[in-house]
Structures are given as structure tokens and as C-alpha cells.
Image: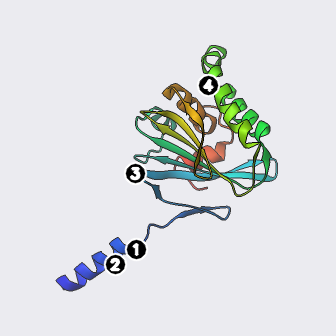
Amino acid sequence: MAIRLVALLALLLAAPAQAAEVAGVKLADAEGALVLNGAGLRKRAFFQVYVIGLYVPEKKTAAAELIDAGGPKRVAIHMLRDVDAGQFTDALMDGMKDNHGEAEMKALEPRAKQLAAIMAEMKEAKKGMRITLDWQPAAGTRVTVEGKPAGAAIPGEDFYRALLRIWLGERPVQEDLKGALLGGKP
């Protein structure tokens, strides 16, 4: 009996973690020390724009807890269609504006411009492209495109929290997407 139990335990531990799948995009249940909190589909009108996964040190179901939690975080965006970098950046900025007052946006503006410059360098977010927005406490917000660092780190945890509010704020870009990122059904 003990041998069977040990063999079963070894088999379970050797099995790879099941990945989440949204709109045909597979997302790992973990990336490094971060676990997938939730994943969903960003739609605009009837277009599927991107799949997004939120990775955090520990799963949470409350938006405010996720936004305010310390430690590293990752937003992984998988593009489902080609989007001009300017349009992509404008959409991010609109999401930030919808969740922040004028004074807050003024304080975020220099860093928002830094993000816009990073996005402008890539010219277009192409179908199949993977863009990550990582919060690294010692470095700031790091943008990677297809696994390669893009631009310099953007300072300030307040800026990363502003980015998270695009999807998790009081006025999220898409309500069902917010629910999916909080661990609900995609």
C-alpha cells in the first residue's frame, strides 16, 4: 500500500501544471514564483483584441487587495489582432484616466509618456505578440515584448497600480474581464 501511495504521489508531482486556455491562447498556471490569478479576453465591439493573464505571488479575489498587494506582479498580454502602437497606448491611457482624477493623472503623466515612448518603438502590437508589464519592486515597471526588455524601467509602484486599475479599477475597461482576472470564468 505504501509503495502505491509513493508511486501515485511521484506521478502527481511529475505531472505538468495545467495551463488555462482563453480564446485558443494557453497561459501557464505559474511564471516563476508568480501564479496565475485569472485570465480573460479583451473585446472591442465584436473584435477579440487580446488575452490577458494576471500573475501574482498569491491568488486573491478582491481587486483592491490585488492592486495594493506588495511584491512582484505580471500582466501578460497575448495579442489576437494587429493594433497600431499608438492605438494600443491610447487605450491604456484612457483606461488609466477612467480610474484616476485629474491630479493623479498629472502626477502619472511623465511615466505615462515613458510607457508611450516604449510602445511607439515597437510600432505595432502584432497578432501573436506577447507583451508583459512586470512590477519588480527593486526596479519598477518593466515592459517586455516577445521576452525582450523594451525601454528603461518605469519608476514608482503607484504607476503600476494605475496600470492594474485599467482592468481592475472601479471603472474597468471591461467588467467581465475584471471578473475573469479576479479568478472568475474567462
Q: Which residue is drawn at 72% across and 30% down?
A: 94
Q: Which of marks 3 and 4 is nearer the N terminus?
A: 3
Image quadrant assignment for residue 2: bottom left
Q: Can residue 87 be seen in this snapshot? A: yes
Q: Is residue 119 left or right of residue 156?
A: right
Q: Comparing marks 4 and 2, which lies closer to the viewer? A: 4
Q: What element carries label 3?
A: loop
Whole-percent x and y of residue 33? 40, 51
Whole-percent x and y of residue 20? 55, 62
> How many numbered markers are drawn?
4
Q: Which residue is drawn at 79% across and 46% down?
A: 83
Residue hosting label 2: 11
Q: What element carries label 2?
A: helix
Q: Earlier in the sequence, mark 4 or mark 2?
A: 2
Question: Spatial distance from mark 3 to mark 4, Cα to Cα?
Answer: 27 Å
Q: How crowded is mark 3: few (under 14 residues within 10 Å), some or many (20 or more)?
A: few
Q: Are marks 2 and 1 in contact (CB under 8 Å)?
A: yes
Question: Spatial distance from mark 3 to mark 2, Cα to Cα?
Answer: 22 Å
The relative height of residue 114 versus residue 76 in the rendered view (above or below) is above
Residue hosting label 1: 15
Q: Which amino acid does label 3 sit on?
A: Ala
Quarter of the figure with the N terminus? bottom left
Q: Which amino acid does label 2 sit on?
A: Leu
Q: In the displayed orientation, state which residue is furthest to the left.
A: 2
Question: Spatial distance from mark 2 to mark 1, Cα to Cα?
Answer: 6 Å
Question: Spatial distance from mark 4 to mark 2, Cα to Cα?
Answer: 48 Å
Q: How crowded is mark 2: few (under 14 residues within 10 Å), some or many (20 or more)?
A: few
Q: Comparing marks 1 and 4, which lies closer to the viewer? A: 4
Residue hosting label 4: 111
